[in-house]
Amino acid sequence: MSATSTAALSAYNEDLLNLVQSLARSCDSTLKERLAVALDGGPSAVIRGALTTSDCRQRGIFFTGRRLRETAAGYLRLGDNSRPMIVDPACGAGDLLLAVASRLPPQSTLPRTLALWNRSLVGWDVEEPFVQMTIARLALLSMNQHPGSDHTNALRDRLFANIVSVPDALEEEWPRGITHVLMNPPFARVTAPADCQWATGKISQASLFLEKCLREAAPGTQVVAILPDVLRTGAHYERWRGRIESEGRVDHVTVYGLFDSKADVDVFILDVTKDTAISTSASWWRPAPKNMQSLGDFFNVHVGTVVPHRDPNRGEWTRFAVARDLQKWRVERSIRLRRRRYAGRTFRPPFIVVRRTSSPSENPRGIASIIVGNEPVAVENHLVVLQPKSGSSSVCQHGMEVLRSRSTTDWLNDRIRCRHLTVDAVRSIPWRRT
């Protein structure tokens, strides 16, 4: 974080502390308004002003809005646990910890509330300004719950000693007694560590956080996490999903949708309980209707094989299908396609091509074209190829009608909300009569 950003956040934290002191003495309408903003929306606005959008994306920093944090916290099964301990290993400005604190059993006095929160709430973040912001906001929340109380002595002692800055939460040793985890971990892409057993290359840091939680958790610990949808549906994370199921019981997988208007990423809420003895789990996505055929019953499905800026222009001249050249929902003759040299795999028409780049905001979502003709065609890797097993053009026509239907868009929006369609998702699209 730059010196300018740190200074801006430190100045805001000073304002929060001044607000705490002012509220300890009185509570007029102006202070009440400042309190409401500090508890909902104020910190994220300040942080977004202090950090650039690119910096937030690079660092995987996303701020949990009211609706999302309340939805996620609603999954916590706190029950009658008299000594809960809830950790947020990437607490940021404290939105999730505030949601947890609001759900803890109400206490009759401010000192009792602070005593409960002090022993129940654990939070870590790599940025000290975020930690200080979390502590100040929890103090403000306690004052909001006990208006008119004498706050002077209650707020004098060191508050929330378990909310601290750490160099790396993934390396932190977890304290004993944790009963619940509620987190919105960083979404940044990082290189998989050398000991990662399920992937290599670049992966979402959020996947490492959840794996760490379940590895460190005691049996019975509940973990609720806000995660990017690619972890739920991406082919690259299939082994990760299997690893999560080997560590715990997946109780709920809830598709949420767009994180917020500032972050172009869809998320889901995962509720999993550490329990290696029970293998039954909720489904990561809604299964296709029973006894209904899918596109995979009629088509062989592949990703296009040409990586335009990597594959050399060598081999025979061949027709070449590129996503930006194709008319949506049209039949394209192979003879009209551009040409390039290519020595790899080609596809013989007729076949359907579907754009891999696909947003849940698009309708229809599985945008397709049909390619017909007598010449083999090379296909770029931004397209999914559906080759009819029967070799029939009529099957392609019906397949394109299925892809264009509202029911398919609805099904895809439940099945996969990340921005690239996978072969498995396309193959699983229900084959409905149109």
Image (tube, rainbow, N blue to C red):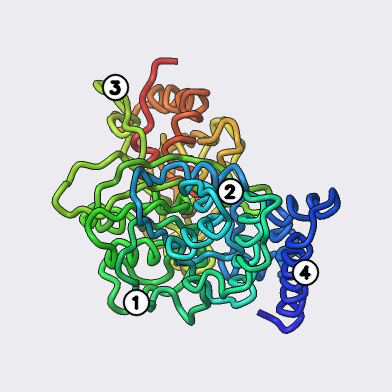
Mark 3 sits on what residue? 292
| Residue nearest the observer in this picture, 243 or 137 | 137
Counting from the top left corner in percent of width and height, residue 324 is at: 62, 48
Q: How many marks?
A: 4
Q: Residue at horizontal 25%, vertical 55%?
A: 274
Task: Tell me the element at label 3.
Answer: loop
Q: Distance between the residues labelled 4 and 1?
A: 34 Å
Callout 1, which amino acid?
Glu
Do the CB atoms of the residues marked 4 and 2 lie less than 8 Å apart? no
Sequence-first tag of 2 and 1: 1
Q: In which quarter of the image is the C terminus?
A: top left
Q: Quadrant of the N terminus?
A: bottom right
> Viewed as shown, does residue 81 lie left or right of 265?
left
Counting from the top left corner in percent of width and height, residue 300 is at: 31, 39
> Viewed as shown, does residue 340 lie left or right of 395?
right
Sequence-first tag of 3 and 4: 4
Sequence-first tag of 2 and 3: 2
Sequence-first tag of 4 and 1: 4
Sequence-first tag of 3 and 1: 1
Counting from the top left corner in percent of width and height, residue 365 is at: 54, 35
Q: In the rendered structure, find residue 18 and report the number of the disc placed on it.
A: 4
Q: How far apart are marks 3 and 1 (CA)?
A: 49 Å
Do the CB atoms of the residues marked 4 and 1 lie less than 8 Å apart? no
Q: Which of marks 2 and 3 is in front?
A: 2
Mark 1 sits on what residue? 173
Mark 2 sits on what residue? 259
